[in-house]
Image (cartoon, rainbow, N blue to C red):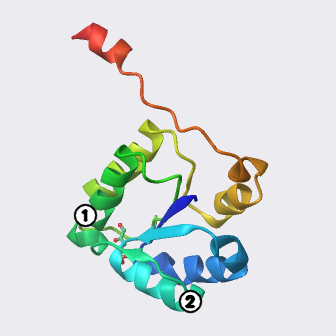
């Protein structure tokens, strides 16, 4: 079963919840993991269990990053807010960085999230890429 991590900053939570409602059927057979507040709200909207980690500013972004590094996450939906500053900005950047390092699909806005939901690749057993650090190691 696919595991999807969902995260939204406060200024983007309403947008994420609206988007998730539109795609509620898509999420029914997926395992969902989320940062604390986002996860509680998602559980209420979707009426299904969501694994809630710590709230973002208290380490939730880092927990999701760790799950990505453990290859437990197939797709990240992260509606971060480009119009407000976050006290845990380094964690936000680290989470996005790990999604890129591990080559998982990451949607930071509705348009990209729509593309992923409608992609035929979603139904396939999408192969995550294990990062190749050989070039980096050669420089040491
Ligand atoms: O801050 C967040 C992501 O960086 C989100 O955390 P919450 O879901 O707990 O609001």
For mark 1, give the secondary structure.
loop
- Ligand 1 shown in quarter: bottom left
- The image's mark for residue 67 is none
Seen in the image, is 120 located left or right of residue 101? right
Q: Foreground: 70 or 139?
A: 70
Is residue 107 positioned above or below 54 on the image?
above
Q: Residue at the location (43% across, 79% down)?
A: 39
Closer to viewer: mark 1 or mark 2: 2
Seen in the image, is 25 located left or right of residue 105? right
Is residue 64 positioned above or below 36 on the image?
above
Q: Name the spot of residue 97 as percent of width and height, x first.
A: 39, 44
Q: Marks 1/2: CA distance?
A: 29 Å
For mark 2, give the secondary structure.
loop
Q: Name the spot of residue 84 as percent of width and height, x first.
A: 39, 71
Residue linked to disc 1 = 88
Q: Residue at the location (35% across, 21% down)?
A: 133
Q: Foreground: 11 or 116?
A: 116
Q: Residue at the location (39% across, 49% down)?
A: 68
Mark 1 and mark 2 lie on one chain; the one further toward the N terminus is 2
Mark 1 close to ligand 1, CB under 8 Å: yes
Q: How crowded is mark 1: few (under 14 residues within 10 Å), some or many (20 or more)?
A: few
Is residue 96 positioned above or below 54 on the image?
above
Q: Which residue lies furthest to the top in this view?
A: 138
Q: Determine the image quadrant of residue 16.
A: bottom right
Q: Name the spot of residue 109 as percent of width and height, x first.
A: 59, 63
- The image's mark for residue 47 is 2
């Amino acid at each position: 079963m696919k595991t999807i991590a969902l995260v939204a900053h406060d200024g983007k939570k309403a947008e994420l919840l609206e988007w998730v409602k539109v795609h509620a059927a898509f999420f029914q057979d997926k395992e969902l993991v989320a940062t604390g507040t986002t996860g509680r709200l998602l559980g209420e909207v979707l009426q299904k269990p969501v694994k809630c980690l710590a709230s973002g500013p208290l380490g939730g972004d880092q927990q999701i990053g760790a799950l990505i590094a453990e290859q437990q996450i197939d797709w990240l939906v992260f509606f971060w807010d480009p119009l407000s500053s976050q006290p845990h900005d380094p964690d936000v950047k680290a989470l996005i960085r790990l999604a890129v390092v591990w080559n998982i699909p990451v949607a930071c806005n509705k348009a990209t999230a729509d593309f992923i939901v409608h992609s035929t690749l979603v139904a396939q057993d999408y192969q995550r890429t294990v990062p190749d650090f050989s070039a980096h190691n050669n420089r040491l």
